[in-house]
Image (tube, rainbow, N blue to C red):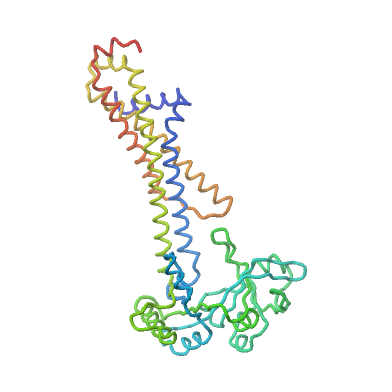
Amino acid sequence: MNTLEAVRIALQSLWANKLRSVLTLLGVVIGVSSVIAVVTFVNGINGYVAEKFFTFGADVIIIQRLPSGPVEVDDYLAALKRKHIEMDDFKAVQETCDACKLVGAAATGTGTVKFSQQSSTDTDIRGWSANMSAIYDLELMSGRTLTDADVSSASSVVVIGYDIYDKLVGTTDPLGKEIRVDGEIYTIIGVGKKEGATLGRSRDNWVMMPITTYQKKYGTESSLLLWAKGFGVGDAMTRAMDELRVILRSRRHVRPGAPDDFDMVTNESVLSIWSSISKNFFLVTIAIASISLIVGGIVIMNIMLVSVTERTREIGIRKAVGAKRADILAQFLIESGTMALVGGLIGIAGGIAIAKTVTLLVGFPTAVALWAVFAGMIVSTSVGVFFGVYPASKAAGLDPIVALRSET
């Protein structure tokens, strides 16, 4: 019997016993589909994070009061005791950081925006210095961005995000019109280009005002974010970070040898944190899926043992006409591997279908990894072959005379 014949027999057996086949392959299907779905999610998010989540470039540094990544509870509680980053810190960095091409300051919150009879809740309220638009690389659809004059005079002007323009203002030209932000009246001077959504959350639901205006409205108790743009990546980025660290440690009176009482974030550091999180998540999924694969392999082994019993007479006839032990062994290994491969293919299709359905429903980014598809096929087949060794050995070891006497 050649390989194709063994595969054909295995497929015929699966088709002839549909319910038993479904139950047999369920563990393999669940295990493979879980891994494929998670890999598709992680691969999609990795690409999305790298491409769209951060609009600032590799030469931008963000300085903030609290840690940006996962930390121990004690470390986070200690970080809560840090001094706020204030406007004086921003001015000092702006004036003394020679390695910084641009320096900006930002404050953020959420609020309610109203235009005419329309309103938007949970809108991002941004307080920006004049340089922030250049550092952030903000593109406008119309109008202008903030200027130093707007910041120095704390002007009541705002630039609005595309969602505010599209859902509140409508077809009316928004420039020069008045809009209410948390009850205060501001004049619209610009409209941002549409940025789309990130992980289901719109990036266009915002209004941006001068940081001095923001602090006049919301107070100065919250810590600022400092944004700095270097003159390039590599050594230029390192020099900028070192100089920023020296300036802020000196201003905040951090003792020599003591850790920084602020956090510095770059594209690279955030992507590294995400990579670590996604890797751990993937490993946990692999561990859980392995249990399903083991259970599926045991079920396949059990079914193959039943198959050996049902086909004892067939095995005896084959041996009587000259089939060798290796032939019988190969036949049953091919059959068990084929059964598991079918389960793996169903699992691959199911995992991709689950991931794409989630994408359609909530906009979660996904990307099918070709290596994961091949890995799913190889792993599922290997599980079938591994757990088929014992039934195949038992079939190959049958005495042909005893097997011919079987009534099954």
Total marks in image: 0
Horizontal arrangement in the rendering, residue 143 relative to residue 41 (left or right): right
Quadrant, the C terminus: top left
Residue at position x 32%, y 38% from top? 382
- Horizontal and vertical percent for residue 48? 48, 60
Judged from this view, the residue extending furthest toward the right is 117
- Horizontal and vertical percent for residue 356? 52, 48
- Horizontal and vertical percent for residue 366? 49, 53
Horizontal arrangement in the rendering, residue 198 relative to residue 328 (left or right): right
Q: Compared with residue 150, is residue 110 higher up or lower down, i.e. above or below? A: above
Q: To which quarter of the image does residue 119 belong?
A: bottom right
Q: Compared with residue 268, is residue 187 higher up or lower down, i.e. above or below? A: below
Q: To which quarter of the image does residue 13 belong?
A: top left
Q: Compared with residue 160, is residue 306 higher up or lower down, i.e. above or below? A: above
Residue at position x 44%, y 54% from top? 43
Horizontal arrangement in the rendering, residue 238 relative to residue 219 (left or right): left
Horizontal arrangement in the rendering, residue 266 relative to residue 204 (left or right): left
Quadrant, the N terminus: top left
Q: To which quarter of the image does residue 79 belong?
A: bottom left
Residue at position x 28%, y 11% from top? 404
